[in-house]
Image: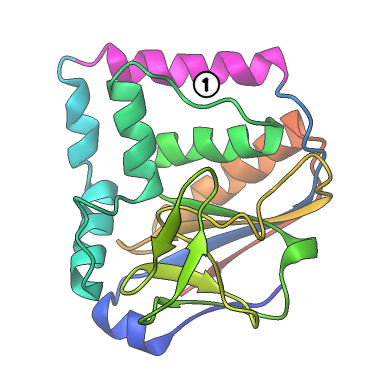
């Protein structure tokens, strides 16, 4: 799967880098060990002297600055990592969906970076990471139609199917999913993407029967 960054987005957000992971998976229920890891990360944050300090991490701030640069209000449209962190800080915990989605959410909280997740059988052609255009929308997973104008989105030849805020129902992972693409979004450079790509790949192998795991960085 070829993933590229649109030059126009790169001009406004020059440090943008993507960590891509593809794998064969089984999207069954999360095993207890994965749920325990999720609870452990939640507990670590909640036990901080100031739990809300995670919302001011450099990764979250870089995402917010990127949204502003693209013309999107980061207070109204939050990066998915920030949204997950806010859930944890509020004591709501991480959602439990399936082993693949739960792995992605766990790594997103650990890295403080948004991660897009796509069923490759539902993706058409190559993917470009670009700013959403006027009039572009899609139905977010468990959400209303999202106004994508000015939002950093992933688009295949059909159109936008994911973003750093919320992915679409069109390419969402279900129990029938066999192969996925996960994309870690960093607006602050590629320095730590290798660590998180390896972490993501290892967790998919451990908890979601991950096989044929391939990773790469796109800058």
Task: Kindly identify the residue that appears in the image at 64 percent across and 21 percent down.
Answer: 34
Task: Give the labeled residue for mark 1.
Answer: 38
Q: Is residue 32 magenta?
A: yes
Counting other residues with Cα less than 10 Å from the Cα at mark 1, is it few (<14), some (14-19), or many (20 or more)?
Answer: many
Residue drawn where x is 66% and y is 15% of the image:
33
Residue most toward the bottom? 7
**Is residue 47 something that shows in the picture?**
yes
* Residue 111: image location, x then y, percent: 41, 41
Residue 155 on image: x %, y %: 55, 75
Q: Quadrant of residue 89?
A: top left
User: Where is residue 102 drawn, in percent x and y?
Assistant: 60, 32
| Front-most of residues 101 and 187 | 101
Specify the quadrant of the image occupied by residue 112.
top left
Q: Nearer the viewer, residue 206 or 87?
A: 87
Count of labels shown? 1
Q: Relative to 72, is 210 on the left or the right?
A: right
* Residue at 29% across, 54% down: 77
Q: How is the image coloured?
A: rainbow
> In the image, is residue 153 part of the stretch drawn in magenta?
no
Q: Nearer the viewer, residue 62 or 143?
A: 143
Left or right: where 20 falls relative to 77: right
From this view, report whether residue 50 is shown above or below residue 118. above
The quarter in which the N terminus is drawn is bottom right
Q: Which quadrant holds residue 202?
A: top right
Q: Main secondary structure of the magenta part?
A: helix
161 versus 49 height, above or below: below
Q: Height in image: 1 above or below 213?
A: below
Residue 190 visible from this viewpoint:
no
> Which residues are the magenta region?
31-48
Q: Nearer the viewer, residue 199 or 54?
A: 54
SS of the residue at dot 1? helix
């Amino acid at each position: 799967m070829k993933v590229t960054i649109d030059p126009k987005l790169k001009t406004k957000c020059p440090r943008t880098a993507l960590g891509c992971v593809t794998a064969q998976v089984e999207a069954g229920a999360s095993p207890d060990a994965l749920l325990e890891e999720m609870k452990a990360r939640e507990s670590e944050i909640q036990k901080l002297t100031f739990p809300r300090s995670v919302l001011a991490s450099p990764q979250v701030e870089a995402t917010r600055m990127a949204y502003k640069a693209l013309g999107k209000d980061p207070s109204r449209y939050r990066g998915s990592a920030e949204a997950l962190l806010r859930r944890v800080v509020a004591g709501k915990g991480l959602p439990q969906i399936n082993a693949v989605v739960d792995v992605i959410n766990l790594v997103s909280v650990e890295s403080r970076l948004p991660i897009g997740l796509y069923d490759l059988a539902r993706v058409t052609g190559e993917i470009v990471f670009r700013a959403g255009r006027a009039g572009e929308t899609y139905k977010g997973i468990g959400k209303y139609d999202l106004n994508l104008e000015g939002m950093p989105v992933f688009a295949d030849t059909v159109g936008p199917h994911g973003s750093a805020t919320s992915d679409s129902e069109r390419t969402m992972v279900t129990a029938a999913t066999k192969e996925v693409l996960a994309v870690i979004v960093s607006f602050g450079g590629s320095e730590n993407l290798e660590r998180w790509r390896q972490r993501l790949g290892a967790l998919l192998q451990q908890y979601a029967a991950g096989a044929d795991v391939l990773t790469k960085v796109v800058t």
